Image (cartoon, coloured by chain):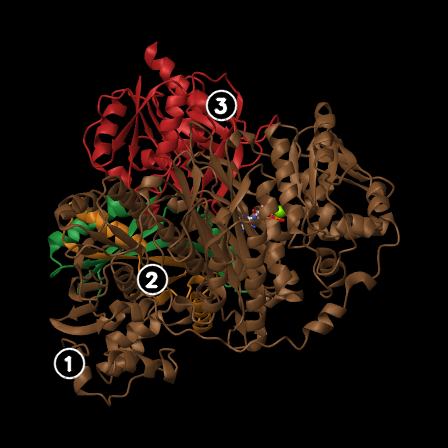
Chain colours: A green, B orange, C red, D brown
Amino acid sequence: MPTIVVEVMPKAELLDPAGKAVAGALARLGHSSFTNVRIGKRFELTVNGPVTPEILADAQKIAEEILSNQVIEDVTAVFEAK
Amino acid sequence: MPTIVVEVMPKAELLDPAGKAVAGALARLGHSSFTNVRIGKRFELTVNGPVTPEILADAQKIAEEILSNQVIEDVTAVFEAK
Amino acid sequence: MRIGVITFPGSLDDRDALRAISLAGAEGVALWHGEHDLHGVDAIVLPGGFSYGDYLRCGAIASHSPIMAEVIDAAKKGMPVLGICNGFQMLVEAHLLPGGLIRNHHGHFIRRDQLLRVENNSTAWTSDFSANEEIVIPLKNGEGGYIANEETLKELEGEGRVVFRYLGVNPNGSLNDIAGISNAQGNVVGLMPHPEHAVEAGFGPNTDFRMRSGVDGLRFFTSVLEGVLA
Amino acid sequence: MARHADTVENAVATPEKEQPFAALGLKPDEYARIREILGRRPTSGELAMYSVMWSEHCSYKSSKIYLRQFGQKVTPAMKEHLMVGMGENAGVVDIGEGWAVTFKVESHNHPSYIEPFQGAATGVGGIVRDIISMGARPVAVMDQLRFGAVDNPDTARVVHGVVGGISFYGNCLGLPNIGGETYFDSCYQGNPLVNALAVGVLRHEDLHLANASGVGNKVVLFGARTGGDGIGGASILASDSFDKTGPTKRPAVQVGDPFAEKVLIECCLELYRNELVEGIQDLGAAGISCATSELASNGDGGMFIELDNVLLRDPTLTAEEILMSESQERMMAVVRPEKLDAFMAVVNKWDVETSVLGEVTDTGRLIIHHGGEEIVNVDPRTVAIDGPVYERPVAYPSWIDALNADSARDLPRAANGEELKEQFLALVASPNLADKSYITDQYDYYVMGNTALAFPDDAGMIRVDEQSGLGFAIATDANGRYCQLDPYEGARLALAEAYRNVAVSGATPMAVTDCLNFGSPEDPEVMWQFSRAVEGLADACLEMEIPVTGGNVSFYNQTGTNAIHPTPVVGVLGVIDDVARRIPSAWQDEGHNLYLLGVTREELDGSAWANTVHKHLGGRPPECDLSREIELASLIRGASLESLIGSAHDLSDGGLAQALAESVVRFGIGARVWLNDIMERDAVDATNALFSESTGRVLVSVPREDDVKFLGLCEAREFPVLRIGVTDRSGAEAALEIQGEFTVPVSELRARSNATLPHYFA
Ligand SMILES: Nc1ncnc2c1ncn2[C@@H]1O[C@H](COP(=O)(O)OP(=O)(O)O)[C@@H](O)[C@H]1O
Ligand SMILES: [Mg+2]
């Protein structure tokens, strides 16, 4: 069934302790090429029927109003998965 | 700086309580086009310097061994963000 | 005086909040998330717990509940609203309070008897404390790290809207050691620690004097009682 | 595309069809017996049911003949307060004032090694559903944990996952965690033990049982949808009966949803309040197979189920997989038809998905239809009750005499106070005795507002009645090292210690639950250990007149030929008329007198001292005088009723030394202690005075003004008592002084004790 993907990332200027912890762990384990890690969410919404522009618009709205908290997060992408 | 993206999703055959809770909320709020929701993670790893095939391979390894728990999750993608 | 406590699916400390209210001498009224009716209460407590499992973001799904529309409305008209832990998270998600709450910096759930300083005793929920009073209130959360952008922090600090600050240990990485804040009017207060767990000797936090004897939480509820009677 | 299940008709028509019974864990003779019972080959659905229900885990086939002792070795006094005994989901004890308590401990060991977080989380979820199904509101949980060596690289993985899982599930469910155990030993390396205990309270009239009575009553499944969780085995059947494309990917792990369970609790309690269920059963291991066959067996004996009505999370599940699925957070109820609408109104209020699967019949058969065809037609008792019973061979362990002969008596002792101090500090910092806050700080004990005692007190205590103060206390114990030396004595010692831990809280011990963790029952030496442990526990319960109300057996905790130490976790429940009378484990005042109740013997075999200082395990476990334990408990109770004591801490692992260390560290109040009276009266050396693990001993603090009364009480009861010190200064100056031996600042003790677990795991 068609799927819409929504990506949400913590705002760049705000703390991301989970990302920081992973970055620290990577460094300790010797994976030194990675200087920074940020952890966000990926939502896969299954759509019942074809993905119309209306449904995509609804997904965008949901992404901004429910799936993310705009005070601390950004919706970085909303698209139909191929 | 270049960024490698790692996407991790809960295994399809396992219960995803988070996705279930969100799907329930969407239905209650009248967004009825979406029948199912699954919630995974999106990691953005900042790379210090160009993304070589070695670094990409390292990221893949990290994705499987550190960023995901292979018993309950799948790494669905590892790629360089444009 | 009647204080409503809203139960959401996954609320845990709703009964404790009702007990605290009655120990403070007010009448507790159990309210249900799915209704649009505040049953004529004079103040509202959003209790702790894991509403809807807190799977999306803490308090996020609950903040869209039918009753929250009424709560937002009443809060804007000045009704005292106290958000405890998950309730604080709901207030933030409902934009009644600024900023956000994220995973503790150490990554774990933590339960501890927490020393706090009451930084503002002129809110609806803190008038019974003296200025800068130090109190012990149990804290228990996995996502209690308070964050906000520079501007918001400055505003909160400048307007005296940081109501409680962690003393001794910052248990979750909150910016500026913030444990609780209020809106500009002072009727809406949210904090991560749990005053309803410090209302009855024998079941509260340890104090220097005796184990489990702390009852500092009671005065949250007596404060609002006096405010409404006044 | 539609997959047709193997029907009864088909089974009759194709008697020779080969079936993968061995891959499902059935022995050839067990398979033959199923064919004999049915008078034909089983359908694949029936085979699925029999194979899970006849597994060791569900049928207790290796342990049954031993567990009977718990029901046989009883006196009338032991039955007096028992409302429900062994055999139900959990035992129920009358605690007075119209209240009852139900409690049980269960293992989730194997899943917690594979996926520690979800394994431990679903372990909590499972035991809590047992409690709900008795009609009770769950009010507390505990966790009994055994991990591999603290410094083994794999241990941190397991610790993080297990503790995180328990914390996540229990906290999110809103149940206070009030105690538990944490031990590290390399014998648990590939076989960590994750036991979880839950307690519930109910009014007498709210008791519910798992039975399906009343012909025509509806059988209802509610809670989470059924998915492909924990049915690794069933895929074998799927591939066998349907297509050649091989088994679908079915995970062996289950994912828990504590939110769904919290809602289920509230929903069930509302159903009970409104008297809408006749019988109820939780779904745990063996899922629908277990719930239908047990409900039917315990009721009118017949049931008809339409399997197509099961709400699925994954529509590709086959009938066999649906029957075997271990999806969490589900319950099955029996509902009168005229109450069905009211029932649905409640589940809808809580947004709990529900479907009617079928009804109770009087046919004596459990009949299941799928896709309009009959795929199961069995006598439910043959599935749920009359499973195989084995009397497995037992063999006296070849190694045990040599182990018993190797006493700690001959190990070198500290030569002077300085060495004694080093040993003391080593013990305090050893992983098994070190402070467990790294773990317990992740557990909420405030929720519900009724926790009178929790870790690090010797017992957890919960107020049941907010008016009268009536409450219960509970503690669990098991010393695997003692059990390795002598499983019979080890089990008695576990009971004695848990009993003592409850007694020192001020409560009166009343009932027992147990979780028997052992190696493979197919190993005759393990089977011997098991038989001895059960006998020891049953004899000890009889002697203390305190009944076993339920429990759990976990076998196969073994890697190759390496079995874990026998670990019979014993939980004791006690009652207290008013929790305001509770006794903490550590003193809160300066200037109290310290008394040691009981006598100290030369008993270092199997001790923490032998382990920490000498890496030694050998000899015989400490002596265990159960009548002494009863006298001790009654003495403490007497003293508590007269409010004579400030604190009481039982002596166990690490002996007096550890009890003192914990007591000064807890509230930062030091102590001055002398050993010479102990050494003189009991004829032991300083090492034994500090580290012996003799049983029947408690350290109490008594305010000066109650001294005379307290001593009078001990004298009247002829209980050995010695004044061994006083509590001392608090604050920065606080220290523990063992006169003539050494002094340690409390701050140093605390630092040592607190550093260990964070060092390995933070
Ligand atoms: N995994 C755990 N979960 C909860 N409480 C624990 C756990 N491990 C240890 N504790 C608590 O820590 C305290 C000390 O444990 P322990 O030394 O084993 O007690 P005892 O010697 O009295 O049996 C007790 O209160 C016990 O309940
Ligand atoms: Mg103890």
Q: Residue at x 44, y 65 (%)?
A: D111
Towards the viewer: D199 or A72? D199
Seen as rendered, the residue at the extreme front is D76
Between circles 1 and 2, the one closer to the viewer is 1
Q: Residue at x 25, y 83 (%)?
A: D41
Which residue has dot 3 on it? Answer: C118
The Cα–Cα distance between marks 1 and 2, rounded to whole angstroms, is: 40 Å
Label 2 resides on the chain identified as: B
Which residue has dot 2 on it? Answer: B10
Amino acid identity at mark 3: Val
Label 3 crowd (10 A; few <14 / some 14-19 / many >=20): many
Residue D266 relative to residue D356: left or right: right
What secondary structure is marked by label 2? strand
Q: Is residue D322 above or below residue C121?
A: below
Residue D307 relative to residue D284: left or right: left
Residue D29 seen by the camera: yes
Which residue has dot 1 on it? Answer: D9
What secondary structure is marked by label 3? strand
Say whether mark 2 is within 8 Å of ligand 1: no
Amino acid identity at mark 1: Glu
Towards the viewer: D301 or D370? D301
Amino acid identity at mark 2: Pro
Q: Is residue D22 above or below residue C156?
A: below
Q: Position of residue D578 (x, y in %)?
A: 50, 31
